[in-house]
Image: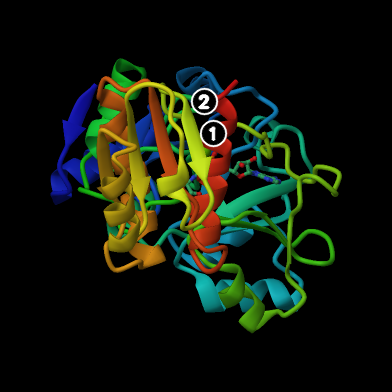
């Protein structure tokens, strides 16, 4: 594995490597992706192997320009164009009827394909230079914390990838929102970088997928995911100071008031604040990096408090709930 810079020669090298069937971790505005040539089934198979990812969990195909989505998906419906125009490039993935040319390995045999035009200039330049759509799951081992820095990818995937393009920290910090437009109503399968509120400004009928009451429309809707190695436990919003950790524990809090209350009660050996000013966007950007850092420490447990269930708070809470489902099992 070699780390590349974002200089023009390194980007050309990264793009050629993808075209030639190698695996290249690339920065996007959400998290680092493990990029592979979407037309190359051998490369796709290596992606699943590198991540230890079950083959029933399909990949997102990334394109450099919104119009290029038509290479892989049917964009006929008017409302599809409306979502593309409003939110692309950006952290929104659209699930659409797939074109026959997309390998079944990328879509796990589904009739739909997930497609996204990322906003990160480095990702877009690499995809443009590669000249092919790029399949890219998050660049982490399956079920573990997502990577928001090149160092996270290097630590957890190491020589399972050929190159890592170091574009610094990811600004959004949680994955894209996955919106299924293949059926009515439009359904958010995964909350992420574009909030439900913003989607509803464009289309008030957008619904949030509810794992408890719905039959799974998304194969990737596993209850546990994004997990640190230490057990993670989650407290309700504003209730972290009431936690009763077993053993030496560290916690992620949301805002100065929460930190002060935890410190007064002395419940945690360490408290890290995701956003002193209680900004959910700042908290989302910091979430995985802080979890990665805490996970290196010698704690019996990690704790985190939920954010208010609105805006990017929903995406953060989704990641915490899934990380906790794994950590406590
Ligand atoms: O922000 C992101 O989306 C990042 C960056 C790298 O772009 N990628 C990412 O990919 O998070 P991944 O593979 O970790 O998550 C893709 C999600 C999974 O939950 C998968 O099940 C879902 O998208 N998905 C992919 N294709 C789908 C389809 N045809 N129908 C329903 N869900 C699909
Ligand atoms: Mg992932």
Instruction: Characterize the local packing of mark 1: few (<14), some (14-19) or many (20 or more) Cα atoms within 10 angstroms.
Output: many
Question: Which numbered disc covers residue 226?
Answer: none
Q: Quadrant of the C terminus?
A: top right
Does the residue at mark 1 contact the one at mark 2 (Cβ under 8 Å)? yes
Does 103 sit left or right of 19 as displayed?
right
Residue at which label 1 appears: 324
Q: Quadrant of the N terminus?
A: top left
Does 183 sit left or right of 150 as displayed?
right
Residue 260 appears at what percent x and percent y? 27, 55
Considering the numbered disc 1 on the image, is that residue within a helix, a strand or a loop? helix
Residue at position x 51%, y 45% from top? Answer: 235
Q: Which sits in the foreground, 134 or 218?
A: 218
Where residue 297 sits, quadrant-wise, is top left
Does 25 sit left or right of 195 as displayed?
left
What is the distance, in whole Å, between disc 1 and disc 2 at their CAs? 5 Å
Instruction: Characterize the local packing of mark 2: few (<14), some (14-19) or many (20 or more) Cα atoms within 10 angstroms.
Output: many
Where residue 206 sits, quadrant-wise, is bottom right
Q: Which sits in the foreground, 26 or 132?
A: 26
Where residue 208 sits, quadrant-wise, is bottom right
**Up/down of 167 relative to 198, above or below:** above
**Up/down of 201 relative to 39, above or below:** below
Residue 197 appears at what percent x and percent y? 59, 75
Q: How is the image coloured?
A: rainbow
**CB of residue at label 1: within 8 Å of ligand 2?**
no
Residue at which label 2 appears: 327
Considering the numbered disc 2 on the image, is that residue within a helix, a strand or a loop? helix
**Up/down of 159 relative to 30, above or below:** above
Does residue 191 appear in this view? yes
Residue 144 appears at what percent x and percent y? 46, 28
Residue 49 appears at what percent x and percent y? 51, 17
Does residue 162 appear in this view? no
């Amino acid at each position: 594995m070699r780390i590349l810079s974002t200089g023009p020669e390194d980007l050309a090298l990264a793009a050629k490597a993808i075209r030639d069937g190698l695996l290249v971790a690339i920065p996007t505005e959400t998290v680092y992706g493990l990029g592979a040539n979407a037309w190359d089934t051998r490369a796709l198979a290596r992606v699943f192997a590198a991540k230890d990812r079950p083959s029933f969990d399909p990949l997102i195909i990334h394109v450099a320009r919104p119009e290029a989505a038509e290479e892989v998906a049917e964009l006929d419906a008017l409302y599809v164009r409306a979502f593309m125009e409003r939110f692309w490039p950006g952290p929104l993935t659209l699930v659409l009827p797939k074109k026959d040319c997309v390998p079944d390995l990328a879509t796990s045999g589904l009739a739909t394909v997930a497609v996204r035009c990322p906003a990160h200039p480095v990702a877009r330049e690499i995809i443009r230079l590669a000249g092919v759509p790029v399949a890219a799951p998050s660049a982490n081992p399956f079920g573990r914390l997502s990577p928001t820095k090149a160092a996270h990818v290097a630590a957890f995937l190491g020589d399972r990838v050929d190159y890592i393009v170091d574009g610094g920290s990811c600004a959004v910090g949680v994955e894209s929102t996955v919106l299924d437009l293949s059926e009515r109503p439009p359904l958010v399968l995964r909350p992420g970088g574009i909030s439900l509120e913003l989607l509803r400004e464009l289309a008030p009928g957008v619904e949030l997928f509810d794992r408890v009451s719905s039959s799974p429309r998304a194969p990737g809707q596993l209850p546990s995911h994004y997990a640190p190695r230490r057990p993670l436990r989650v407290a309700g919003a504003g209730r972290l100071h009431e936690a009763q950790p077993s053993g030496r524990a560290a916690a992620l809090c949301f805002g100065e008031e929460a930190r002060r209350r935890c410190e007064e009660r002395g419940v945690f050996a360490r408290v890290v604040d995701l956003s002193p000013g209680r900004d959910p966007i700042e908290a989302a950007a910091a979430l995985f990096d802080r979890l990665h850092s805490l996970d290196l420490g010698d704690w019996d447990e990690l704790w985190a408090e939920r954010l208010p269930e609105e805006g990017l708070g929903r995406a953060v809470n989704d990641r915490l709930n899934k990380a906790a489902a794994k950590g406590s099992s």
